Image: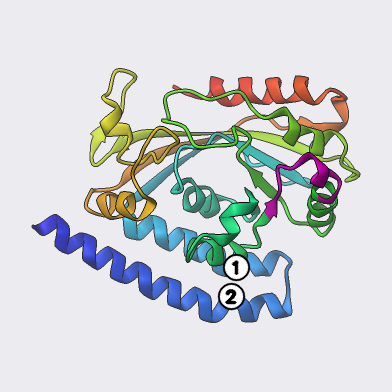
Amino acid sequence: MLRIVFACFKLFLFSVLVLFVTLTQPLVLLVTRGRLSYVIPRFWHWSVCRIFGLVIDVRGDVYRDGQVMFMANHISYLDIPVLGNVLSASFVAKQDVEGWALFGFLSKLQQTVFISRDRAAAKDVQRQLDARLSKGQDLIIFPEGTSTDGRDVRDFKSSLFSLVVKSTVSDLRVQPVTVQVMEADGVPVRRDSDQALLDIYAWHIDMDTDLGVHLWRFAQTKGARLTVTFHPPMRAAEYSDRKAMAQACQKSVKGGLV
């Protein structure tokens, strides 16, 4: 019963936070879409992590000497506040996320780039991403194309790396990022842990649980501890083959799983 009371309180705080962001961030975006436009989103992500008990241990160094695309594995929708708490960057998401209730609107306030997977739209997608990067915005991409159970890293979609190889942005870097669940609801996560323990945080393709139901269940827990590992960045100019770059990046991310 106590857990339910705490969960209700967390969701109340979350609702207040949503109201604050929806009233303030649109005004900020009217004035600027530069670095200052990430102040409120960073506060949002930090607050979500505090409310729901997401503790983040950062390993490695974030590349800050130029434009960068962060390529991370994807375990849950909770990866968004986790990475958004660490990085001042916009996410790249599939187009149908734009139509999600509430979360689609919040994604727009974060200046998310919604892209189509249709090959016919490839040139338009390229222009969108290059325009963002040229304006000084860094980007976060989940190149697995879906969320996974957290035990392994799927092959990266090489089509996304064609956007990197063909980019017109000068000296663009790609930085592999590994997100790993280390503890869920106060219990350490190990290689032989039951999937049910991982699924306290993970929300992935093999689950039939609605997002709202999963969030409610997660709110009743003590939260999760994660590590976010930043691997050495890769220079886009050194790769002419999108598949080779996708494989090299995937190998770095997978190697970060302890």
Number of residue marks: 2
Q: Which residues are magenta?
A: 114-124
Q: Where does the image place residue 250, in percent across and percent down from the top left?
A: 63, 24
* Residue 118 magenta-highlighted: yes
Q: Is residue 202 left or right of residue 72?
A: left
Q: Which residue is mark 1?
A: 109
Q: Is residue 85 positioned above or below 160 on the image?
A: below
The one nearer the camera, 229 or 13, is 13
Q: Is residue 3 left or right of residue 194?
A: left
Q: Where does the image place residue 242, in percent across and percent down from the top left?
A: 80, 26
The residue shown at (34%, 19%) is: 191
Q: Is residue 4 left or right of residue 136?
A: left
Q: Give the image quarter of residue 104.
A: bottom right
The residue shown at (64%, 46%) is: 140
Q: Where does the image place residue 119, in percent across and percent down from the top left?
A: 79, 39
Q: Kindly check if marks 1 and 2 are in contact, taking CB atoms under 8 A apart as contact.
A: yes
The one nearer the camera, 210 or 4, is 210
Query: Mark 1 or mark 2, which has the lower sequence index?
Result: 2
Instruction: Locate the N terminus and report the quarter of the image it occupies.
Output: bottom left
Could you say whether the residue bearing mark 1 is in a helix, strand or loop? helix
Colour scheme in use? rainbow
Q: Residues within 10 Å of mark 2 (few under 14, many from 20)?
A: some
Q: Which residue is mark 2?
A: 25
Q: Where does the image place residue 125, in percent across and percent down from the top left?
A: 79, 49
* Amino acid at dot 2: Gln
Q: Is residue 51 positioned above or below 221 on the image?
A: below
